[in-house]
Amino acid sequence: MKKWESHCKKCGLCCHEKVIVNNTLIIDLDCYCEHYDIKTKTCKIYATRFIDSVRCKKVTLSKAMFAPYLPPTCGYVEWAKLKHIRFSSIRMLRLIHSKQPPSDDDENSIYQYF
Ligand code: SF4
Ligand code: SF4
């Protein structure tokens, strides 16, 4: 179990609100789970997250293989890609700030993955 969880890079991106539009996964850096600590980028209830949060879902082997809402930068996804068992068709990742006005830097938050 510990070995599997060691794939997590603790980036916290899966704890944010997200939506898939066409082939782009859009993650909102300003909206996240109520248990997420934005300063430390960690879960405040990590040990009991599957009990105390109805929305929190464990990243299983199946999710590493198929879940389109996991970012391509996710450690589990990268592991699945290395094993040639990643089958989600998402190609792009866009990080947005919904609570800030758009800026010229927004273009820098679009990444492409193959
Ligand atoms: S409960 Fe789950 S989704 Fe919420 S911060 Fe913790 S790990 Fe992330
Ligand atoms: S996106 Fe993946 S690597 Fe990042 S915190 Fe979530 S499970 Fe861990």
Image: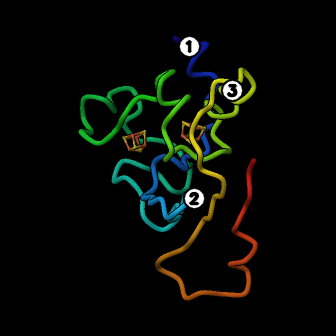
Q: Is residue 35 left or right of residue 79?
A: left
Specify the amino acid type for callout 2: Asn
Does label 3 or label 2 sit earlier along the sequence? 2
- In this view, 112 is above or below 59: below
- Position of residue 8 measured from the top left corner of the image (x, y, whole percent): 61, 31
The answer to whether mark 2 and mark 1 are in CB contact below 8 A is no
Residue 18 or residue 91, whichever sits in front: 91
Residue of label 1:
2
Residue 45 sits in which quadrant?
A: top left
Q: How is the image coloured?
A: rainbow
Label 3: few (<14), some (14–19) or many (≥20) C-alpha neighbours in 10 Å: some
Mark 2 sits on what residue? Answer: 23
Quick check: which quadrant has ligand 2? Answer: top right
Question: Can you tell which mark lies on residue 79?
Answer: 3
Between residue 80 and residue 57, name the one nearer to us.
Answer: 80
Rounded to the nearest angstrom, the CA distance separating label 3 from label 2 is 21 Å
* Relative image position of residue 64 (x, y in whole percent): 55, 29
- In the displayed structure, 32 sits above or below 107; it is above
